[in-house]
Image: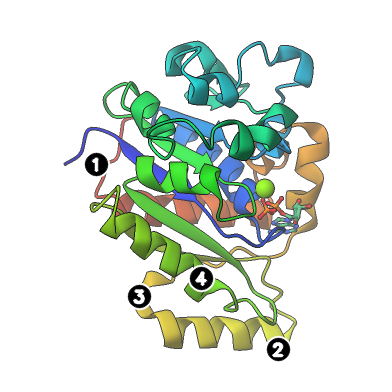
Amino acid sequence: MPEQHIVAIANQKGGVGKTTTAVNLGAALAQAGYPTILVDLDPQGNASTGLGIGTEDRDFTVYDLLTGDADLMTVAVDTAVPNLRVVPSTSDLASADVQLSQVADRTRLLERQLSDAPHGTIVLIDCPPALGLLTVNAMVAASSVLVPLQAEFYALEGLSQLLGTVKQVRQGANPKLRINGILLTMSDYRNNLSQQVEADARETLGDLVYPTVIPRNVRVSEAPSHAQPVLIYDPSSKGSHAYRQFATEFTARLKLIPEIA
Ligand code: ADP
Ligand code: MG
């Protein structure tokens, strides 16, 4: 069993639930007793904000990690959720594609740093909505890729491009990279379209699709404005329940032995 599980949460489409999944899966894993580090790799910094790390608290960021100016345990800060740390990002990261494009080994900048994660840590990487240098760094560092798909029309569009990037990384810098799974998000059970998208996804992608589907839930969308995961903001909401259930499927897929919380 690998010492660390590093999972890139990726989809080049924006607004499909990557950050929401990173924050709430991270919180659910931490609450279940797994030490977890969320790496915010999106210049928008929504995962950092959603976990209560204000811009004034971001002394070191993921950019310092990429440039080698700081190491993982320096940049990872505690959150209000015990066991959950976050490596914050800022808008500086927006220029990383250009700034780092001339660096030797530019696709391995994150991999080099994440190997410092303590034994048994789960690292989740919240990727930006693009398949550029940042997402490639995440895939090179990762053991697997988790793909959130919004249960909407056109959900499957763009997936082949994403899977193509995974394949390229596997043929090049990271032969061990796997697809962890596909998570359907923002599903509306009253809407036939959501059900149709779910049926299509299961038919096309089979067992890659997680059994749990995350419902569209207003408490999930409110939680970030309170700088909290929904699991803290409203633990009994449908969204919290779904993310906890998903976390148990996720750890089973990683073949992790349940920790004593
Ligand atoms: P991405 O990181 O892929 O761009 P986000 O996680 O930021 O996507 O989600 C996009 C928007 O949808 C956010 O405003 C978020 O609060 C909202 N959202 C995500 N998941 C849900 C959900 N299950 N129910 C309701 N709103 C959601
Ligand atoms: Mg995001």
Marks 4 and 3 in Cβ contact (< 8 Å): no
- Which one is in front, 130 or 155? 130
Q: Tell me what residue is drawn at x 81 percent, y 46 percent.
A: 222
Secondary structure state at the residue bearing disc 4 = helix
Q: CA distance from mark 4 to mark 3?
A: 20 Å
Q: Amino acid at mark 1?
A: Ile
Tag in front: 4 or 1 = 4
For disc 2, the marked residue is 192
Q: Tell me what residue is drawn at x 58 percent, y 37 percent.
A: 41
For label 4, the crowd category at 10 Å Cα-Cα, with few meaning under 14, some 14 to 19 and many 20 or more, is few
Q: Amino acid at mark 3?
A: Asp
Give residue 216's quadrant in the image: bottom right
Q: Which mark is residue 207?
A: 3
Q: Earlier in the sequence, mark 3 or mark 2?
A: 2
Whether label 4 lies within 8 Å of ligand 1 gets the answer: no
Q: Earlier in the sequence, mark 4 or mark 1?
A: 4
* Residue 196 falls left or right of residue 35: right
Q: Position of residue 186 (x, y in %)?
A: 68, 66
